[in-house]
Image: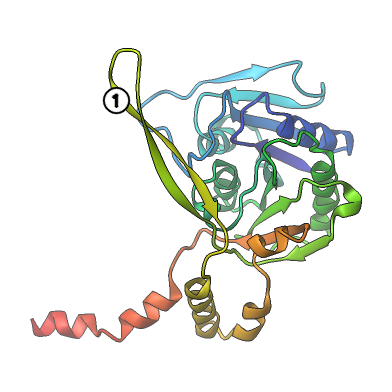
Amino acid sequence: MNLLISNDDGIFALGIRTLANTLAAAGHRVTVVCPDRERSATGHGLTLHDPIRAEQIESVFEPSVQAWACSGTPSDCVKLALGALLSHPPDMVLSGINHGSNLGTDVLYSGTVSAAMEGVIEGIPSIAFSLTSFSSQDFQPAANFARSLIDRIAQHPLPKLTLLNINIPAVPDHEIAGVIMTRQGVRRYFDMFEKRIDPRGKTYYWLAGEVLEDVDEAELEEAGMSGLKASGGDAEWFRKTATDVQAIRKNYITVTPLQYNLTCALGLESLQKWQIQSSFMEG
């Protein structure tokens, strides 16, 4: 397959090097276009008021891998690759392997997920891979899983406009409990801003805080099940499906299908009862 790979950890990150080299060794044609430095938590940001530069990189990856380092965001990288650097669209866009998890509501901030989502926006099947540790340097099990998954997708294509967000626990192979399909969970943070003074006496703030995973997911479940009801889906099945946050604690590889359509079915159903149009016309 013809694969485009990006990330948000930068061109020299071990995760993307392991993924690209593993897939190239498996016979895939691999092109890497990723930021020239770390661009984590940039979300789906685009560069509109500055030029975007791309420099071809040698000696970082296996010789068969074509690679560019881009001055922009992860989303910029995929846009640039599809619009200028590649002569033909890839069969699939991959992002990662990220150093650290992208679980629950992390996906709203994640440059890793956003790079993959850019592929979906362009109608290309896409997958985001994350290793759920900031300290582990062993990306090979995650890369091996990516290789086997891509082989399977080649035989059974993804549903149209679907992104797979995959998190791999940072444990030895024999400790992985299995692979499980999950729904997006809730992962919130207790934010704190540390106030500091720079050497010139100017005040600045440093974002810190702790993740809060054990939060009430009732609102998420209600919204999700309302969407299923609206489309004739099985709400009970949805309720019984584990979230990515829950499953990763038990050392499962989590596979969560995402989409870029953020319409809130619950809100749409509720607002229809307002009869806004008739109220506006009467006013």
Please tell me whether residue 116 is drawn above or below residue 224 in the rendered image: above
Residue at image position (57%, 86%) is 232
**Image quadrant containing the C terminus:** bottom left
Q: Amino acid at mark 1?
A: Thr
Q: Quadrant of residue 192?
A: top left
Residue at image position (63%, 51%) is 124
Q: Quadrant of residue 59?
A: top right
Could you tell whether 185 is left or right of 137 in the image? left
Q: Position of residue 156 (x, y in %)?
A: 80, 62
Residue at image position (77%, 45%) is 170
Image color mode: rainbow
Task: State the residue in front, 153 or 13.
Answer: 13
Could you tell whether 142 is left or right of 163 in the image? right
Q: Position of residue 189 (x, y in %)?
A: 48, 52
Identify the residue under disc 1: 203
Q: In the structure shown, which secondary structural element does the residue marked by tag 1 occupy?
A: strand
- The outermost residue toward the top is 200
Residue at image position (86%, 51%) is 148
Task: State the residue in front, 188 or 233.
Answer: 188
